[in-house]
Image (tube, helix red, strand yellow):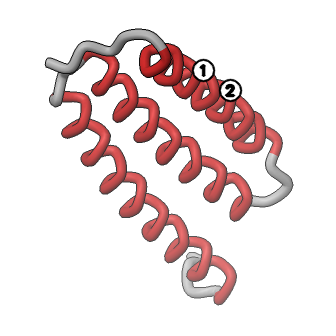
Amino acid sequence: MVSLEGPLLWGALLTLFLLSASILAALVRVLRGPSLADRVVALDLVAYLAMGFLMTYAILVGESTYIDAALVLGLLAFLGTVAVARYIERIRSGEGVVQ
């Protein structure tokens, strides 16, 4: 277990604070985004910022389980973004219209 002391501890705490503020800002874009594509990109950003938060927290508490959770979150975020991009493409091309 890594013991964080002094400037390294304050740096980790500052990083957690800045990542939290960034997540909140991206969530505002998810809720108020002008288009579906903007909302999808913002939601993807939230997922990757949450990955950074989990990684930093894992270092802070010395628990590697959070790193595994962050990697799974990244994989799911990527697959979700690809699925939504395919859905948007189908809707725009007219393939997804049920008659």
Position of residue 17 relative to residue 77, above or below, is above
Residue named by callout 2 = 21
Amino acid found under the numbered disc labelled 1 = Phe
Position of residue 32 relative to residue 11, above or below, is below
Rendered residue at 24%/37% (across/down):
67
Rendered residue at 39%/30% (across/down):
56
Instruction: Count neighbours of disc 2 (C-alpha within 10 A) and say few if under 14, some if 14 to 19, many if 20 or more.
Output: few
Q: Secondary structure at mark 2?
A: helix
Q: State the residue in front, 92 or 71.
A: 71
Instruction: Count neighbours of disc 1 (C-alpha within 10 A) and say few if under 14, some if 14 to 19, many if 20 or more.
Output: few
> Would residue 51 appear left or right of 66 to someone viewing this image?
right
CB atoms at circles 1 and 2 under 8 Å apart?
yes
Residue 90 lies in what quarter of the image? bottom right
Residue 18 lies in what quarter of the image? top right
Q: Position of residue 42 (x, y in %)?
A: 65, 50
Q: Secondary structure at mark 1?
A: helix
Total marks placed: 2
Rendered residue at 16%/28% (across/down):
65
Amino acid found under the numbered disc labelled 2 = Ala
Q: Quadrant of the N terminus?
A: top left
- Mark number, residue 17: 1
Q: Position of residue 15 (x, y in %)?
A: 55, 27
- Mark number, residue 53: none
Q: Nearer the viewer, mark 1 or mark 2?
A: 1
Rendered residue at 43%/15% (across/down):
9
Residue at the far front: name it.
6
Q: Position of residue 57 (x, y in %)?
A: 36, 23
